[in-house]
């Protein structure tokens, strides 16, 4: 049990790629290059995004196919990143990241031919699903970017710069991941592919558990805070009432005297 909890905490820290307080302070008035750097950094350290991309390209061998799938993902996440940030559309980032975690589980399950083995049917359209999950990934990136106090005068430029940085980070991640996948291809690739895609599912489940735990912890914290505020207000009202009664009695006693 202790080993499980330790592993969970380690993986949680790895997968928690929130914008740090220093990033939030540093990029209030960030330049074009600053936001490109921040986008690239966030993508490279965004293990959930990278895991999903690894799942997407895992069995692809032809460059046109890789370009087609990565483009679908890029268009998807660019749409929600740009528009959600510009129009300040947001949601609880723990829930969004939980869906992103599910996308990692989904891709591993699909790569293992789970739809045929479990549901006795073909998987949904691959390009469409990559695009749809791209929309969710972009929304997750947007919730992070909206943690910054973006300058309204240069809002669109900041968003586009961040998105450009995300694309650079994505390319860098693919340039590292794909050669490794090519190296693994060989006589034992089938066994390795099963192991790696089960690894995607397990990592996705850890990440999903982490995000849901964060969401429910937030809810409990808000409820505790609301309860403390209510108690404080109630005590203040009681003390005010007691003070007013005390002053009233003192006034009566003085008048009688």
Image (cartoon, rainbow, N blue to C red):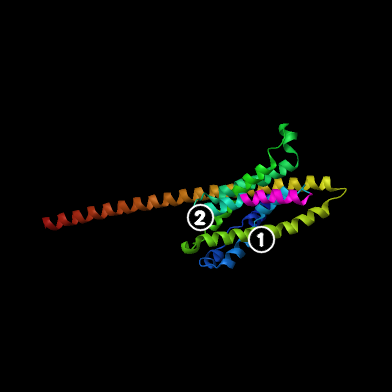
Q: Choose the circle earlier in sequence order: 1 or 2.
A: 2
Q: In which quarter of the image is residue 42?
A: bottom right
Q: Can residue 3 be seen in this view?
A: no
Q: In which quarter of the image is residue 175?
A: bottom right
Q: At 75% across and 56% down in the image, what residue appears? A: 177
SS class, disc 2:
helix
Name the residue beneath numbered marker 2.
86
Contact (CB < 8 A) between labels 1 and 2?
A: no
Foreground pick, 174 / 15: 174
Tell whether 42 sits left or right of 216: right
Q: How far apart are marks 1 and 2 (CA)?
A: 21 Å
Name the residue beneath numbered marker 1.
168
Q: Residue 92: x, y in percent?
A: 52, 49
Q: Give the range drawn in magenta.
A: 61-75
Q: Residue 253: x, y in percent?
A: 15, 56
Q: Residues within 10 Å of mark 1 (few under 14, many from 20)?
A: some
Query: In the displayed image of the protein, which residue is found farthest to the front?
Result: 64
Q: Residue 244: x, y in percent?
A: 23, 54
Q: Main secondary structure of the magenta part?
A: helix
Above or below, 106 relative to 78: above
SS class, disc 1:
helix
Tell whether 197 sits left or right of 92: right
Foreground pick, 62 / 139: 62
Foreground pick, 14 / 57: 57
Q: Residue 106: x, y in percent?
A: 68, 43
Query: In the displayed image of the protein, which residue is found farthest to the top?
Result: 120
- The quarter of the rendered structure image containing the C terminus is bottom left
Magenta stretch: includes residue 113:
no
Q: At 55% across and 48% down in the image, what residue appears? A: 215
């Amino acid at each position: 049990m202790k080993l499980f909890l330790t592993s969970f905490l380690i993986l949680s820290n790895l997968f928690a790629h929130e914008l740090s307080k220093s990033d939030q302070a540093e990029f209030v008035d960030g330049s074009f290059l600053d936001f490109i750097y921040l986008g690239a950094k966030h993508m490279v350290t965004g293990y959930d995004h990278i895991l999903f991309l690894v799942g997407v390209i895992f069995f692809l061998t032809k460059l046109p196919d890789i370009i087609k799938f990565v483009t679908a993902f890029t268009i998807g996440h660019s749409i929600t990143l740009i528009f959600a940030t510009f129009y300040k559309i947001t949601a609880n980032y723990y829930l969004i990241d939980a869906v992103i975690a599910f996308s990692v589980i989904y891709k591993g399950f699909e790569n293992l031919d789970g739809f045929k083995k479990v549901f006795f049917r073909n998987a949904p359209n691959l390009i469409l699903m990559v695009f749809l999950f791209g929309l969710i990934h972009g929304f997750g990136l947007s919730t992070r970017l909206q943690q910054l106090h973006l300058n309204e005068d240069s809002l669109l430029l900041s968003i586009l710069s961040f998105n450009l940085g995300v694309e650079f980070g994505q390319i860098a991640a693919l340039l590292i991941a794909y050669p490794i996948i090519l190296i693994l291809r060989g006589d034992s690739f089938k066994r390795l592919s099963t192991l790696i895609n089960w690894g995607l599912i397990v990592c996705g489940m850890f990440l999903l558990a982490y995000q849901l735990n964060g969401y429910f912890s937030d809810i409990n914290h808000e409820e505790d805070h609301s309860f403390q505020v209510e108690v404080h207000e109630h005590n203040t009202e009681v003390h005010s009432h007691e003070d007013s009664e005390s002053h009233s009695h003192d006034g009566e006693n003085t008048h009688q005297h």
